[in-house]
Structures are given as structure tokens and as C-alpha cells.
Image: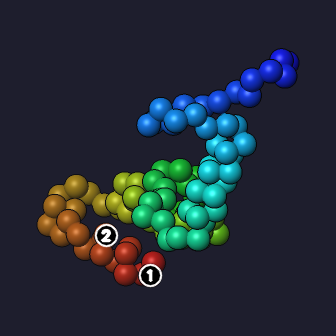
Amino acid sequence: METGQPVVVRAAAGQAISRRDFGAIAASGFAASLLQPSAITFGVQSYSFRDRSLADAIAGMQKLGLRSCELWQNHVEPLKIPREDLRRQPFAHIQSVLITRR
């Protein structure tokens, strides 16, 4: 590697920044991001836990520290209820699932 001119990165305003300065700026930005609450919410689709029951999937999500979830249909829809019965009370089963899982 040549030892002549240092490698520089051009800032948006056209000002040259050395690798050392860039590393310091990046590290301080990363450290500041750890100290402030994030506006980004991480979650999971319960399909990722399709090999488990809903209760086990929720336990796994809690173990990972996830607080947001989009539910997969097989976790909340009853499997052996005829379609006509579901149409008469479409939310009864889902409400019972959500209430018992809190």
C-alpha cells in the first residue's frame, strides 16, 4: 500500500474527510443512537414461528425481546369450524384467542 496521500472521503458539501475523522464521526453517531430511544419498531410475523402453537410463539417472541407481531392466520383462525359457523360469529374466536393470551 502506498504511504503518500491519505485516502479521503468527500463530504456532501465537498469538504474532504480523512478515514480517521470519518471513523470518529461514525462511532460518535452510533454511540449517540444507543443513548436515545429509537423511533423504529422491530417486530415479527408469527409465521416465523409456524412450527409452534400461538402460546409458544408468543413465549419465543418475548424471549427474543420482540414486542410487536403480525399474526399469521393459522395461529388465530380456528381450523375445524365450518365456514358457515365462522360467518355467523366472525370475531368470536379471534377475541377469545386475544383475551386469553394477554
Q: Quadrant of the N terminus?
A: top right
**Spot occupied by residue 69 in the image (x, y as percentages of width and height):** 44, 62
- N-terminal label among 2 and 1: 2
In this figure, which residue is indicated by the disc labeled 2? 94
Query: Can you give x and y, in whole percent of width and height, for residue 16 in the image?
Result: 58, 34
- Residue occupying the far top of the picture: 2
Q: Amino acid at mark 2?
A: Ile
**Identity of the residue drawn at 31% across and 69% down:** 94
Camera-side residue: 17 or 58?
A: 17
Q: Is the C-beta separation of discs 2 and 1 under 8 Å?
A: no
Instruction: Give the alpha-carbon distance from disc 2 to disc 1, as whole Å.
Output: 13 Å
Mark 2 crowd level (few <14, some 14–19, many ≥20, 10 Å Cα): some
Residue 71 visible at all: yes
Task: Identify the element where label 2 is drawn.
Answer: helix
Q: Is residue 70 left or right of residue 22?
A: left
Q: Amino acid at mark 1?
A: Arg
Image position of 20 with respect to 45: above or below: above
Residue at 40% x, 58% y is 70
Q: Quadrant of residue 23?
A: top right
Q: Secondary structure at mark 1?
A: loop
State whether residue 98 is above or below residue 20.
below
Q: Residue at x 83, y 18 (%)?
A: 2
Extreme-left residue of the structure:
88
Mark 2 or 1: the one toward you: 1
Question: Label 1: which residue?
Answer: 102
Vertical relation: 102 (above or below) 50: below
Location of the C terminus by quadrant is bottom left
Taking 28 as reference, is 80 left or right?
left
Crowding at mark 1 (Cα within 10 Å: few <14, some 14-19, many 20+): few
The mark found on residue 12 in the picture is: none
Residue placed at 50% from the left, 71% from the top?
Answer: 37
Percent x, y for residue 63? 64, 69
